[in-house]
Amino acid sequence: MLYPDTTPFAEGLLEVGDGQRIYWMQSGNLEGHPVLILHGGPGSGSSAGTRRYFDPQYYRIIQFDQRGCGGSLPHASEPAIDLTANTTWHTVEDIERLRLLLGVECWIVYGNSWGCTLALAYAETYPQRIESLLLVGVTMTRQSEIEWLYHGLGRFFPEEWARFRAAVPKEDRSGDLVSAYYRLLLDPNPAIHVRAATDWHEWEAASILVDPRAALSPRWSDPRYLTARARIITHYFHHLAWLQDRQILRDIHRLATIPCTMIQGRMDLEAPLVTAWELSQAWPEAELVVVANAAHSTAVAEMADAIIRVTDGLRRDIHR
C-alpha cells in the first residue's frame, strides 16, 4: 500500500552555475534517513506520487527537478533555450551541490527509468556518498537502448511507428529519428516544435499504454511540459547521454561494496529486462527482482508493492 502523500516542508532554488537554478524540495521527516529520488525522462520533472513509496515518518525524502524541467529555471520550453549546459555530468555535479546544501553525508538513491542511468553515473563518480541504490525500470542509456526505443520497438507498434516516422522531413525518415526530432524541437516556430513534441509523446504513449492499468500523466496535456520534456530527451539521446557506450558496465566495479536492488517488470518494452539482467551479471552483489506481470509503469500495484517492500526492508535493516 502506498504511503500517504505529504506536503514538502522545505523547498528552494539552488544556483548551480551556467545561469541554471535547480528547484528542490524535502518532505517526510527532517530528522529521518535521507533518500534522494531521481526522476525519469530525462525532463519529466519530480512527482508527488514517487515519494509515496517511502514511509514519511522514517525517511527524509529529497527531490529535485533536473535542469530545464519542472520548477527549475530556465525552462526548456522557452523559445531561446540553450541546452549546452544540460548534460549528464552537469546533473551529476548538481546532485553533489544539493547534497552539500542540505548537509547530507550519504544517502539512499532511488532512480526510475532514466533516473537509473543518472543514479549509476552519480554513484560511480561519488561512491562514498551512496548508502544503497534502488533502481526501477533499469536503463543505462546505451546506443542499443536508444535504437530500440525509436526503431526496434516499432515492430510491436507498426502503425504508431509509421506515424512517428512520417512526422519528420522525408529525407530524415530512413535515418536517425532522434536527431530529426531534435532539430524540429529546437525550431523557434511554435507550430513546428509543439507539433513535434506532440508527435514524440504519441509514440511514447504507445508502449506505456501496452499495460491497460497504466495511465499517462495529466501533465501530458500541457504543451509547455511536452515541449520541454521532448527537447531534453532528444538532446540527451542525440548526444548518447555523454556516456561512452558500456561505460556504466565498465565502471561497475566501483560499486562492488554498495547494496543495490533492481526492480524490473518482465513485460517492460521501454526498458527491456535484458538491460537489468546484463547489469546484474556484471554486478553480482546487486539483487534483481523481476515482477512477472508488470511493464514500465511503477504506478501499477505489483510494481508499487515491490518498491515498498524494498524501502520498508531498508528501514528495518538500518534499525538493526
Image (spheres, grey):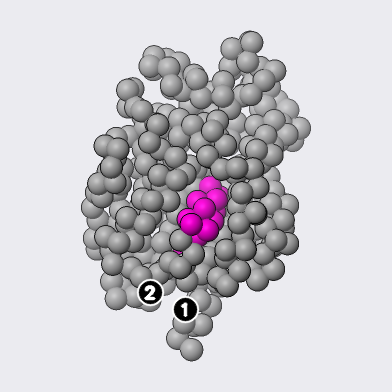
Task: Give the mark nearest the N terminus, 2 or 1.
Answer: 2
- Side of 99 where 173 appears, left or right: right
Few, some or many residues within 10 Å of mark 1 (<14, 14–19, 20+)? some
Point 36% across, 47% down: residue: 65
Q: Quadrant of residue 169?
A: top right
> Do we see residue 292 in this rendering?
no
Few, some or many residues within 10 Å of mark 2 (<14, 14–19, 20+)? some
Instruction: Please provide the residue range marked out in magenta.
Output: 108-125
Where disc 2 sits, the SS reads strand
Residue 117 on the magenta segment: yes
Q: Position of residue 50 (x, y in %)?
A: 44, 58
- Side of 241 where 220 appears, left or right: left
Residue found at the far right of this picture: 155
Which secondary structure class fits the magenta region best?
helix
Residue 31 on the magenta segment: no
Location of residue 164 with respect to 102 vertically, above or below:
above
Q: Position of residue 150 (x, y in %)?
A: 65, 32
Residue found at the far top of this picture: 170
Point 76% across, 32% down: residue: 155
In the image, 209 versus 100, the foreground residue is 100
Q: Which residue is mark 2?
A: 33
Q: Quadrant of residue 48?
A: bottom left
Location of residue 174 with respect to 215 vertically, above or below:
above
Q: Amino acid at mark 2?
A: His
Q: Are marks 2 and 1 in contact (CB under 8 Å)?
A: yes
Point 64% across, 10% down: residue: 171
Q: Which residue is mark 1?
A: 315
Counting labels gives: 2
Q: Gap in Å between the C-alphas at discs 2 and 1? A: 8 Å
